[in-house]
């Protein structure tokens, strides 16, 4: 992976994390840095799954890959919010 690809993955991951947080209903009591880390991990996992399914490189915007990434981010935010909430109370 080139340096520009690495930074692009981080930026897209940050956006994916924010989208994942918006998808999860209710208030998530987790720090923003955790949301961003979840987004980066979700972007990587989503890309791997999209590649395995053969939908990672389509003409135009890769909507299916983006959808998979947001689902991973939403799941990660939901799990983290549950774990973080239990730990703090």
Image (cartoon, rainbow, N blue to C red):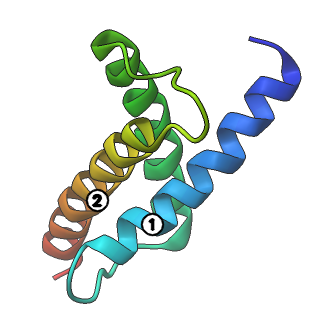
Give yes or no for contact between labels 2 and 1 (Cβ–Cβ under 8 Å).
Answer: yes
- What residue is shown at x 53% (from left), y 20% (from top)? 57
Residue of label 2: 74
x 41%, y 36%: residue: 65
Label 1 Cα neighbours within 10 Å, binned few <14 / some 14-19 / many ≥20: some
Q: Quadrant of the N terminus?
A: top right
Foreground of the two, 7 or 51: 51
Residue projecting furthest to the front: 59
Residue receiving disc 1:
19
Who comes first in sequence, dot 2 or dot 1? 1
- Up the image or down, 13 lies above or below 36; here it is above
Residue 78 place in picture, x, y as percent:
21, 64
Label 1 SS: helix
Q: In the displayed structure, would residue 50 be above or below residue 31?
A: above
Left or right: 20, with 1 as reference point: left
Q: From what the image shows, is residue 76 above or below residue 44?
A: below
51 horizontally vs 15: left or right: left
Expressed as whole percent of the image width and height from the top left, the position of residue 44 reads 48, 29
Question: Residue at the spot x=19%, y=57% of the render?
Answer: 79
């Amino acid at each position: 992976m080139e340096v520009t690809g690495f930074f692009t993955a981080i930026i897209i991951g940050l956006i994916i994390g924010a989208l994942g947080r918006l998808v999860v209903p209710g208030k998530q009591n987790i720090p923003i840095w955790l949301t961003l880390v979840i987004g980066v991990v979700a972007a990587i996992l989503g890309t791997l799954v999209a590649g395995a399914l053969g939908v990672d490189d389509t003409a135009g915007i890769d909507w299916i890959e983006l959808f998979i990434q947001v689902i991973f981010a939403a799941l990660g935010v939901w799990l983290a919010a549950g774990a973080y909430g239990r730990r703090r109370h």
